Amino acid sequence: MNYAEATTLDTTVTSMTKPRVYAWLVFALTFGLLLSDYMSRQVLNAVFPLLKAEWGLSDTQLGSLSGIVALLVGVLTFPLSVMADRWGRVRSILLMATLWSVATLACGIATNYGQMLTARFFVGLGEAAYGSVGIALIISIFPPYLRSTLTGAFMAGGAFGSVVGMALGGVFAAKFGWRSAFVVMAIFGAALVVTYALTVTERRLRGSSAAAKELRDSRPGFSLSLRNLFAGLFSSTSVICAYIGSGLQLFIMAAVIAWMPSYLNRYYAMTPDKAGVTAAVFVLIGAIGMVVCGVATDRVCRHSPPRKLAMAIAYCLTTAIILGVAFQLKPGFNQLVAIGLGMFLVAGTCGPAGAMVANLTPTPIHATAFATLTLANNLLGLAPGPLLTGVLADRVGLLDAFKVIPLMALFAALTFWIARAHYGQDIARVQQQALATEV
């Protein structure tokens, strides 16, 4: 039995009425700000040696400058996303991007550790909820059948931005000093903020100022009370499984990315700089895979949304097989190719999982819903993946640890299989609720 793609609980459907060119322009600008987000976050890593030499910082202090941003993102994503759903996503995006751009500039003029730490605090504050709010705005102006493509492409922006930030930061720092690296990132972000403010408005997104006001104030069919908020976020077995399955699958990607430089150094005798560059290639492969898998999922499943769960299961099982075989091979060209293929598919579930979250939660709380997905990705995958791999490596060695890690994909596949068993029923209930709000 086929089910139509849900439009969620908000009766205002803007994605079918906006000009296609303008929608893609909004996507490009929102994606550009995501690149700025991660470039501003990761440029610090490129100037660690220079900061250490100039200020005499310890490794603990250097780590705190990086860690404070991740800490604020983890702690504040959810509450700030709730505020953005209430206050307005366009205004929230402009405020967040302005804050992290100004804070990045402050990093460039800092004269000591304390000033740099304070500036990095505000970078983290500005970036905390951008990912969830940005994707929520994007999916609101595109047809539902493109949700896997958009989610996969948008999430891949984090990986692209990280690589670009470290690469450009290193180049500018080497030629013009470490301060120039932060200044360039700040200018890039500020230019995008001005362009965004002149191009993207609630009125253009929603068609009229009256419609925008109605969407913000009345929220037809859904009241943003705390009770309704949590009921909307965890309304079905399918959406809960989407949160969990996505996090479990990203456990593998996080573990491999974090430990790949060490693996290449220990088992391929690569120097640290060469190992870092090679590992960055695998990061890019994973990012490209997010985009391609998202596009493939939407194309295959356009007329049968439940197939997205089958695609997610296929990505999990294929990843488990390919990476499981890869780490059984002897170090060499064939192993690197197999690892690359596995990394291409490992985050393919991001698109289907994001589409499920969008389809099964009310439109007025989409930013909060994606913040919940981000929280699950961090708590179940991105944070424990590197840590538990390191614990296991201390006991059995890094190679044997890598042999075990791909098994996590089997648990992710099981979670998506449970979601698939309930998805049709959950989608039907969402559609009934949406119809009820129109009466």
Image (cartoon, rainbow, N blue to C red):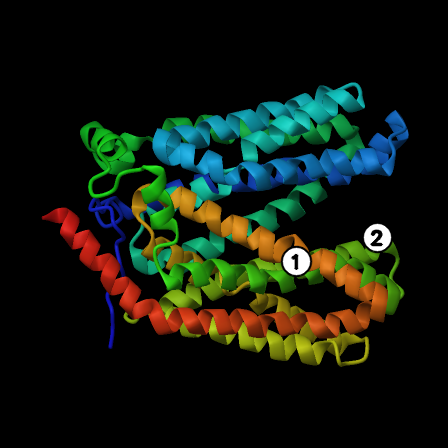
Is residue 157 among the parts visible in the rendering?
Answer: yes
Residue 226 rendering spot, x and y as whole percentages = 36, 38
The residue that label 1 is drawn on is: 254
Toward the front, the furthest residue is: 227
Q: Residue at x 38, y 27 (%)?
A: 198
The numbered dot on residue 14 is none
Residue 101 left/right relative to 54: left
Q: Position of residue 423 (x, y in %)?
A: 33, 68
| Residue 182 vertical position relative to residue 387 in the rendered view, above or below | above
Query: Given the current orientation, which residue lies at the most extreme left position?
Result: 439
Determine whether the residue tagged by mark 1 lies in a helix, strand or loop.
helix
Q: Residue at x 59, y 57 (%)?
A: 380
Compared to 235, does 421 lie above or below?
below
Q: Are the residues flagged by discs 1 and 2 in contact, CB closer than 8 Å?
A: no
The residue beneath circle 2 is 273
Residue 412 as seen in the image, left or right of residue 281: left
C-alpha span from label 1 to label 2: 20 Å
Q: Position of residue 337 (x, y in %)?
A: 69, 73
Regarding mark 2 in the picture, which secondary structure is present there? helix
Is residue 247 toward the left or the right of residue 62 in the image? left
